[in-house]
Amino acid sequence: MKFTKTPDALRKSMHLYAITDRKFLKDGQTLADQVREAIEGGATFIQIREKNISFDEYVRLSKEVKAVTDEYGVPFVVNDDVDVALACGADGAHVGQEDLDSGEARRKLGPNAILGVSASSVEELLAAVESGADYLGVGAIFPTGTKLDADPVTYDMLKKICDASTVPIVAIGGISKDNILKLKGSGIDGVAIVSAIFGADDIKASAAELSRLADEVKGK
């Protein structure tokens, strides 16, 4: 039940975008186990993000996660590494401003894969869309321990980016159940979360609560 990319399906999939982090693994638990819990709780999109890992290990982990996301028909992308995305058969890749050029990423991935790009300004948004981005990850919205070098993005800038965008926008950076409702009215299509999902004692329950709060953010 592999995800099929259409504009409507992709926009809906932004609702609760979960990004993995192996530092939260508990004894005997695999990344695939955590991803399954997140999806069963309400995660609608999965990104695997690994640093300081070999190519072969990244591909192996990605294949394990992809087996779960395919089972649920949830889109799955690889952070930063387009070659890993191609090798494991992921639905696509997500690249940052300091990673592979988004235009080159699109050329390597081909037209049918999902390409996400990080952005923190309207200028970066427009350049990314011109290069073939399918969606934008905008942040850091709140202070985050996951990416300490991320530039802060104000609520007003987030709204400007959403207003100017023709592709889905997912907000990222330090988002939790305690601050997510501050994003009401911004125009985002969803939220991207690491710690508040995978760092929770009960991943499934946390994802369910964040999914409900994301509905409130979008006025549903």
Image: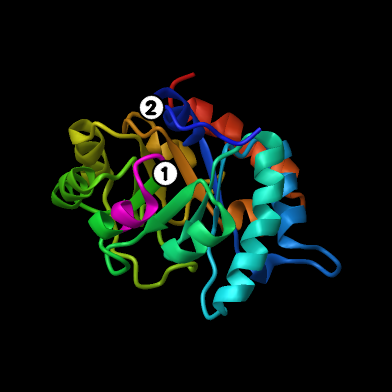
Left or right of residue 111, residue 12 in this image: right
- Residue at image point 53% right, 81% down: 52
Q: Residue furthest left?
A: 123
Magenta extent: 105-112
Quarter of the image for residue 208 reads top right
Q: Which residue type carries mark 1?
A: Ile
Q: Earlier in the sequence, mark 1 or mark 2?
A: 2
Quarter of the image for residue 133 reads top left
Say whether residue 166 is visible.
Answer: yes
Left or right of residue 201, residue 54 in this image: left
Q: How many marks?
A: 2
Secondary structure at numbered mark 1 = strand
211 up-or-down from 156: above or below = above
Is residue 174 within the magenta segment?
no
Is residue 109 within the magenta segment?
yes
Say whether residue 179 is visible.
Answer: no
Asked if disc 1 and disc 2 are in contact, CB closer than 8 Å, the reply is: no
Q: Which residue type carries mark 2?
A: Pro
> Which residue is under mark 1?
114
What x and y, as percent, mark residue 193? 52, 51
Check residue 201 in the rendering and tell me which mark sits there, or answer none: none
Secondary structure at numbered mark 2 = helix
